[in-house]
Image: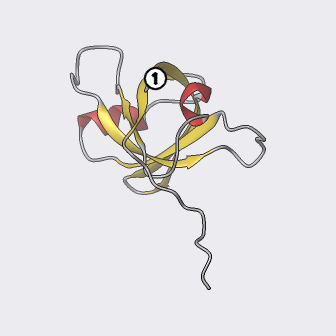
Amino acid sequence: MKQTRATIVSNSPLMPGVNLMWLDAPEIASVAIPGQFVFARCSDTADPFLRRPMSIHRIGAPDEDEPTKLAILYGVFGSGTGLLSKLTPGQSIDLMGPHGNGFDIRPESRN
């Protein structure tokens, strides 16, 4: 588990109330596996106090050989995710992760 400042690469709505945020976070992207999540601090102030758990939607942008970026797909439901939805490329957020056990997605051989 690492704590790092991640730079926002993009943060765009996919549909009303749902955003996709790409983050440049090599310390997390290089070790994360499917099924894990990060805790995102929504602002640099004490409000909201608690970090928000965010599932890692994707690791590595298509143009990357070694993953340095990760994506989170999130619904805008309250004050914390509302603050996240207003962040713009170039800004940064504090992340902790990856958390969780994750899982292996390699195909099984069937005989």
Residue at the far front: name it. 111
Say left or right for 62 vs 104.
Answer: right
Count neighbours of disc 1 (C-alpha within 10 A) and say few if under 14, some if 14 to 19, many if 20 or more: few
Colour scheme employed for the rendering of this structure: secondary structure
* Quarter occupied by the N terminus: top left
The total number of labels drawn is 1
Residue sitting at x 37%, y 30%: 40
Q: Nearer the viewer, residue 44 or 54?
A: 54
Q: Is residue 19 above or below residue 50?
A: below
Residue at the far top: name it. 45
Please tell me in which quadrant of the rendered image residue 105 appears: bottom right
The residue under label 1 is 2
Horizontal and vertical percent position of residue 75 = 35, 50
Q: Nearer the viewer, residue 92 or 14?
A: 92
Say left or right for 82 vs 103.
Answer: left
Q: Is residue 8 above or below residue 43?
A: below
Amino acid type, callout 1: Lys
Residue sitting at x 53%, y 24%: 6
Residue sitting at x 28%, y 33%: 80
Q: Nearer the viewer, residue 58 or 30?
A: 30
Horizontal and vertical percent position of residue 60 = 65, 43
Q: Which secondary structure lies at badge 1?
A: strand
Horizontal and vertical percent position of residue 48 = 23, 25
* Quarter occupied by the C terminus: bottom right
Horizontal and vertical percent position of residue 44 = 35, 15
Q: Nearer the viewer, residue 71 or 98?
A: 98
